[in-house]
Amino acid sequence: MISKAIRLARVGSGSELAAALLVAVGFPCIMLAAIIPNLWFFAAATATTYLADRYLHHCGSYLINRLAAVRAGLSIRFLVRQLLLILLLSRMGYGEQTLFYVTVACLLAFYGLQAPQSAMVTLIRLRRKLPVVTRNIDLGSVRIGDAPPQGLMNRPAEKMLHLDVFSMVGVLVAVETGENAIAYAGLGLTLGLAVGYLAALLPYVRPSRLVPPETKVLKAVGDWLAEYRPTVMLYFSGSKDSAYQVNMWLETMAQLGGRPLIFLRERNIVPQLATTSVPVLCVPGGVHLMNLDLSSVRVAFYAANVGKNIHLLRVPTMKHVFIGHGDSDKLASVNPYSKVYDEVWTAGRAGRDRYALADVGVRDEDIVEVGRPQLATIQPWSGAPKNPIPTVLYAPTWEGWDDNPGNTSLLLAGENIVKRLLDSEKPIRLLYKPHPFTGTRSAKAKAVHLRITAMIEQAAAQRATDPRWAKESAALQGEQAEARAESARIEARLAELSSGGRTARDEAELSRDSLADPAREAETARLKDEWNAASWRAQGWWEHRVITGSEMRLYDCFNESDAMVSDISSVVSDFIASGKPYAVTDSAALGEEEFCRQNTAVRAAVILSNSATELDALLDAVTDPGADTLAQARRELKQYLLGPDEPTSLMQFDAAVKALAAKSEARNVGVAKSLGEPVGG
């Protein structure tokens, strides 16, 4: 019943639901206490609503937005409490006394101070919002003042409104004790702090603390482009949850020849971007993009098929290439939209054949096989488990945009897979890493994910107290404590590096100060590798683990595991680079023959039904080389899907960039000659 109520209320936990109920019940109780009147009942109910309200805001509850939509927003709730305090004073016989009038006057004055505070905060935010967001780009010609402290700008409405607590407490204590001076002190403190808040904001509304006009900022960006003259760019548009799609290409872009540029379209992706020394330019406005001079760019890469791509595709002086964000047998890998690009780059021959079979208008001569540069960090399989018991990674993809049962194993097979792995006769260690989009569209998928997470956490807790693992746990306690301490040290250093020693900064100040620092980037990359290694050491090789978020990288999970269970997605194609056994779930129940016919990447996999009864074959392949009947098939499939090992994928990719850039340059020269225009750099 409680879990159903949580789902209906769209809250994240039982405590969040309880807080919402306390807010809903608390306000009628305050009104009742004021009418009766009962001072202690009033005080208790008021304190309850303050605390519950604060908790809902702290956890970012969905209900907060719903309250605002039904005219019960934050300001209204505080105002109602103050009005009920006035009612309480009236009902307790203070209606004709000085305390009553002073309280009314002070609360009205406090309400009046909220308008200029809100106006100043809004003005600062609007006037400090640049038309672009940058990283590693020198905007020195644009004078951008220091940002206000986060203490002033973070949740300003809440901070201002909560100043009425001093008035509320002062008046209630005065009523109880008869000492009116206490009420006046509380009311005065509320007004004094409110005026102080305004005074603290005032310096930041001066023109010198705001950013210059839009035209000046765009001119500075144009001047930088004219000086830097980027030659190759990665263009990306998407939600903040899709930032992984651009992050996977950052290292490749940094290693390319020429002058690379990362070009983004949404502000909320910039904070999610991994560390890079490549210049990053985020231009949310389509008109601003169209007015930028990108004539030096010869090759533009696209990691996703989205509507905003058209804003750059209209530029004829560059060649446009779809590189995607993974290579798989999903329909998205043969999207008909892909024919708008000059070329489509795939990892290996499989991608070329996929387009030929789909017949969506992408010509064979426009497809280039370049490998997958990102896979260089994946370690090849040694042929045996790296620990005394094998580690199996379950990495299902998300539910997709429709309810096709073949989208993900999570809905029909996920719990069966996890149960069979946890209850395996031969003990294994289970790592569960779901897709970042899991549960974003389907409530059923989210519910299954939560149940699987609970199952694994319960199994991990049971294993922690199991005598079979006590000896190993005791032997590794010192090493694990040392690893945890190292992780904490690295996290502190990474935070210091990412903030540049400062934490109170906004988007404009970050654009001003975030200049390329190769030494800092190298240290950050090294520390992230060390953090990953320390995080694995901090847990025993027998401990089950749920891995979410971006900190623990997918390819590190590949290297830590001995086998994988997944779905039709690029995760499978990437895992094949390791040479390790893997299983793929036929969630749509196509049958093994048809499933393999439709999906190239599963032709060297153990095919699972939704019951997951075939998992024993996967575990046997991991522990017994003689039982691994698909080893040769995996080697052949690896080359077909990902291309040859030599030359390296990065070399293939860079050579393809240079070849296409030459075509772009030749096209531009030809057009200039035909128009009788001068030809030159």
Image (cartoon, grey):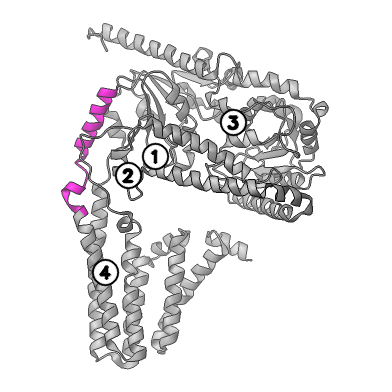
How many callouts does the rendering have?
A: 4
- Say the numbered circle drawn on residue 570: 3
> Dot 3, how many residues are within 10 Å of its Cα: few (below 14), some (14-19), or many (20+)?
some
Instruction: Verify whether residue 227 appears in magenta.
Output: yes
Nearer the camera: disc 4 or disc 2: 4
Q: Are marks 4 and 2 in contact (CB under 8 Å)?
A: no
Amino acid type at mark 2? Glu
Amino acid type at mark 3? Ser
Nearer the camera: disc 4 or disc 3: 4
- Say the numbered circle drawn on residue 507: 2
Helix or strand or loop: what does disc 2 sit on? helix
| Precedes in sequence: disc 1 or disc 4 | 4
Residue at image mark 1: 270
Nearer the camera: disc 3 or disc 1: 1
Distance between mark 1 and mark 4 Cα atoms: 35 Å
Camera sees residue 329? no
| Position of residue 543 in the picture relative to residue 97 (left or right) | right
| Precedes in sequence: disc 4 or disc 2 | 4
- Say the numbered circle drawn on residue 193: 4
